[in-house]
Image (cartoon, rainbow, N blue to C red):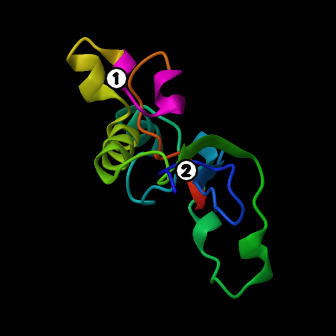
């Protein structure tokens, strides 16, 4: 048998699909200590907050299987890529293609979602609520 040849009987073609449930940002999600000036803290933070209770489901709960607003789809194909290539793809997902962009060769980035962003941005960030594998 030839490696990565999928037209043979009983040959398994596999891959790993990664998708995220993304939460919406709002300043109403920010929680600050009551003793401090909320306006000053909001100005200091200078960005919206995200809900934090979305990931508090145990694996046994039925709602843990229900994902909504799935975005940022990435695929890992161990049948067609060696371990080094898969590790490079995961690293690009982690740093948002920042390394590839800094070397001046953004076409070397292996994270498809990250490449489509106007500036380097990691695949998992503070908007990520949950990841489906």
Give me the disc on residue 22. none
In terms of secondary structure, where does tag 1 sit? helix
State which mark lies toward you, 2 or 1: 1
Give yes or no for residue 17 being in the magenta stretch: no
Span of residues in magenta: 107-116
Query: What residue is shown at x 58% (from left), y 54% (from top)?
Result: 15
Circles 2 and 1 in contact, beta carbons < 8 Å = no
In the image, residue 116 above or below residue 111? above
Query: What residue is shown at x 29% (from left), y 18% (from top)?
Result: 101
Side (left or right) of 131 relative to 104: right
In the image, residue 65 above or below residue 4? below
Query: What residue is shown at x 64% (from left), y 83% (from top)?
Result: 59
Q: What x and y, as percent, mark residue 13? A: 63, 56
Q: Quadrant of residue 96?
A: top left
Q: Quadrant of the C terminus?
A: bottom right
Whether residue 43 is visible, yes or no, is yes
Q: What x and y, as percent, mark residue 65? A: 75, 72
Give me the disc on residue 108. 1
Q: How many marks?
A: 2
**Residue wearing tag 2:** 128
Whether residue 25 is visible, yes or no, is no
Side (left or right) of 100 relative to 111: left
Crowding around mark 2 (Cα neighbors within 10 Å: few <14, some 14 to 19, many 20+) is: some
Query: What residue is shown at x 42% (from left), y 60% (from top)?
Result: 33
Front one among 80 and 109: 80
Side (left or right) of 10 relative to 87: right
Q: Earlier in the sequence, mark 2 or mark 1?
A: 1
Q: How far, Cα to Cα, is label 2 from label 1? A: 25 Å
């Amino acid at each position: 048998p030839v490696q990565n040849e999928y037209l043979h009987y009983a040959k398994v073609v596999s891959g790993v699909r990664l998708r995220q449930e993304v939460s919406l940002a709002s300043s109403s999600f920010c929680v600050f200590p009551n003793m401090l000036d909320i306006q000053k803290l909001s100005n200091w933070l200078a960005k919206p907050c995200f809900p934090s209770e979305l990931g508090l489901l145990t694996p046994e709960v039925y709602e843990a299987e229900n994902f909504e607003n799935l975005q940022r789809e990435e695929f890992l194909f161990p049948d067609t890529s060696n371990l080094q290539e898969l590790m490079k793809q995961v690293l690009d997902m982690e740093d948002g293609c920042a390394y590839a962009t800094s070397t001046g060769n953004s076409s070397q980035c292996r994270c498809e979602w990250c490449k489509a962003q106007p500036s380097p941005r990691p695949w998992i960030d503070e908007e990520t609520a949950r990841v489906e594998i």
